[in-house]
Amino acid sequence: MDPLELGQAIRDELALNPEIKSEIDVDIDGDVIRLTGVVTSSQERHLAEKIARRLGAEKIDNDITLESREVSSRDLPGAVTKALDDAGLSGIAGVEKVIDGVVYLSGHAYSALEAEEAIRAASKTAGVRDVVSKITLLPEAVADDATLVNDIEQAISAAGLHVENISASARDGLVHLEGIAWGANDRQLAETAAKSVPGVRGVVNRLRAPSEPLSEDERVTWDVLRRLERAAINAVNISIVVSAGTAFLDGTVDSERQRDEAGAIALATPGVERLENNLSVAA
């Protein structure tokens, strides 16, 4: 994606995101994406940058500023505590201290997602310039890496994503996701699903979009998936792998008709020369 297309994609995503309440400008300077504007919370500022990075921006100048609001340092801890309580997160995190508008949170969580939710709630509080998290995982949430990978794959599958296109690895609770995110939101959905698993300390999201360079097999796999979706066949429970001209279909469908139709669509896809249709009809 060239810089102009990337800039427009970021503008569109910012405009559609319900958590972005303020107007944020996106400018392109060579290969640098510059974000400017005035927002009401540090959460908006961080979210705008996160969106830009998720869409592919590598070099970002985040010049977004916070709207000045009169909140005394004495009142800020109470305001953040109330925000955590309102979000149902008071049992996970608490305010350790506040220094010049920077809130330090401490506590224990079951997963990285719980910790993120606490940071998000604190960041939305008026007067908060930034949040430093000292939230750690509960000892009972810590799991071995093999168990984490298995739980993450199940969470990704439950989110309606194709596990065969996403590989997960873990080391000491830090998870790496690699592979292809087929749908527009699949990259973020996979990251959220992984972060929700108890014992995950953090996620390094290296999933790439289909718009990035694909191998021939990946391109044909993507084409088969999209053709199934256009035919209104629910591919959530279908595993699609194309290798050296052979399309392998595994999983379940709702009827024999869907099984036959899915096979016919896959075989008619350019690049598919042979078919192994192992789909079964769900009981």
Image (cartoon, rainbow, N blue to C red):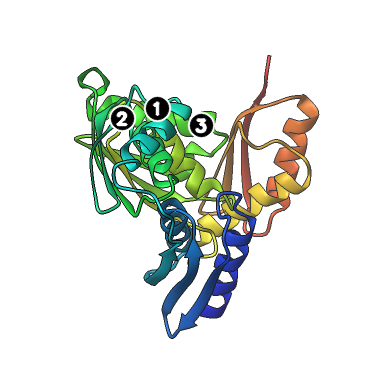
- Give the residue number, with chain letter if any, for mark 1: 89
Q: Are marks 1 and 2 in contact (CB under 8 Å)?
A: yes
What kind of element bears circle 3?
A: helix
Q: Position of residue 93 (x, y in %)?
A: 31, 30
Q: Is residue 147 above or below residue 172?
A: above
Checking the image for residue 239, the label placed there is none
User: Relative to 42, is 183 on the left or the right?
Assistant: right
Q: Position of residue 76 (x, y in %)?
A: 34, 42
Looking at the picture, which amino acid does disc 1 mark?
A: Leu
Quadrant position of residue 121: top left
Q: Residue at x 51, y 50 (%)?
A: 181
Residue 93 is tagged as: 2
What is the spatial separation of the Cα atoms under label 1 and label 3, in whole angstroms? 27 Å
Q: Is residue 220 left or right of residue 234?
A: left
Depth check, front residue: 160 or 218: 160
Residue at horizontal 29 percent and vertical 30 percent from the top: 94
Return the x and y of residue 136 as percentages of the image width and height.
Answer: 22, 32
Mark 1, residues whose alpha carbon is within 10 Å: few (<14), some, or many (≥20)?
many
Amino acid carrying label 2: it is: Ala
| Badge 3 amino acid | Ser
**For the residues bearing labels 2 and 3, Cβ distance under 8 angstroms:** no
